[in-house]
Every structure is written in structure tokens, then in C-alpha cells.
Amino acid sequence: MKDYALLLPILFIFHDMEEIIGFGYFFRNNKQLFERFPRITAVYKDFSTEGFALAVYEEFIPFFGISLLDYFIPCKVLNALWLGTMISLTAHFLVHIWQSIYIRKYIPSLITSLICLPLSVIIIIKSLSIISIDLLTIILIPVAIIGMILNLKFAHGLMHKYGKKLSGRS
């Protein structure tokens, strides 16, 4: 597992840099998407690049933390939590690919999602061959996935609050 542990934050950083760099320009030049796809764009209502970068930084902390712990203290519990976190990131790539297909337009995150998705799947498959799957692992993988979903919601909340503050609407 040590060979794969630090690939998780590397893939995360690679992917999220495309989002940080591209979303501000994308939203400024595609305002009609907010009217056409309100459920998808609601997350970005008070978007600012600074707020988004804050959310990405907050999300990075558990990705990097669990990876470091798994790298330096490899054990069944950390392996399972790492794998659940890796599965969460892989699902994140799938969401972006689906969003782009659904709105029929490139969105910042598509290119790195297409690059990272097959790599992530390979890493998950190779990790599954290393990790012993037992009841604890089966329980901890969904726990990690749920934890990452909750963390994503928290990060989006930070992004909204910071975006409102920057726009003077706090």
C-alpha cells in the first residue's frame, strides 16, 4: 500500500488545480448555465476563486492526512479508510464527466477527470489485491466515503460564506 498511498493527494492536487484555474473564467463567460441548470450550479452561486481555493485547501487536508498516516503507519484500518477516500475521489471524477456530458460543454475539471479516472481505477484495483478484505474493511470503506461526502458539503459551505463575505453580502 505504501507504493500507492501518496498518489491520492497527488491526483487530488492535479485535478483541483484545473478547477481553481478555470472555474472563475468559466462562470464569468457562461452565466446562462446558472439559469439553465440551477441544481448543478447552485453549489457555485457565490463563487469566488479565493473561496473556491479555500474549499479545495480544506478538502485537501483529509486527503493528505489519511494518505500520510497510511504511508507512515500502514495498518488495516488506515488502508481501508484510504481506499474509501480513493473511491470518493474516483467518484468525484465521474461526477465531473457526467456534468460535462449533461450540460454538453467542457467544464474546468473535465480534462483532469478523464486523465485521473483510469489511473484511479487501476490504483483501486491494485490496492484491493493488497488489502485483506474482511468485515472491518467492508465497514470502514463506506465510513470513509460518507466522511468525504460530509467534508465536501462542509467545504462548499466555507466557499459560500467566503464568497458572500468577499462580495460584501455577509
Image (spheres, rainbow, N blue to C red):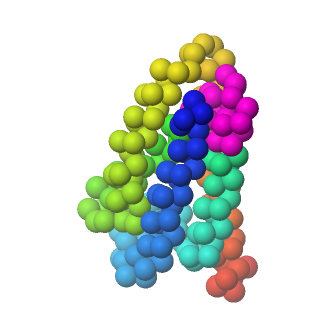
- Type of secondary structure dominating the magenta stretch: helix
If the image is split into quadrants, where does the N terminus sit?
top right
Q: Which residues are magenta?
A: 67-85
Left-right relation of 7 to 72: left
Q: Residue at x 31, y 62 (%)?
A: 103
Front residue (pair 45, 133): 133
If the image is split into quadrants, where does the C terminus sit?
bottom right
Farthest-out residue, bottom: 168
Does residue 87 belong to the magenta stretch? no
Q: In the image, is residue 30 above or below residue 36?
A: below
Is residue 38 among the parts visible in the rendering? no
Does residue 72 belong to the magenta stretch? yes
Q: In the image, is residue 57 above or below residue 78?
A: below
Left-right relation of 12 to 140: left
Left-right relation of 90 to 147: left
Estimate the x, y position of residue 107 in percent, counting from the top left.
36, 65
Q: Residue at x 66, y 78 (%)?
A: 164
Front residue (pair 55, 120): 120
Q: Residue at x 58, y 44 (%)?
A: 6
Estimate the x, y position of residue 35 in percent, counting from the top left.
39, 72
Farthest-out residue, top: 134
Q: Which quadrant would residue 52 be assigned to in this image?
A: bottom right
Estimate the x, y position of residue 161 in percent, counting from the top left.
69, 71
Q: Residue at x 40, y 66 (%)?
A: 108
Estimate the x, y position of residue 97 in percent, counting from the top left.
35, 52
Q: In the image, is residue 145 above or below residue 51?
A: above
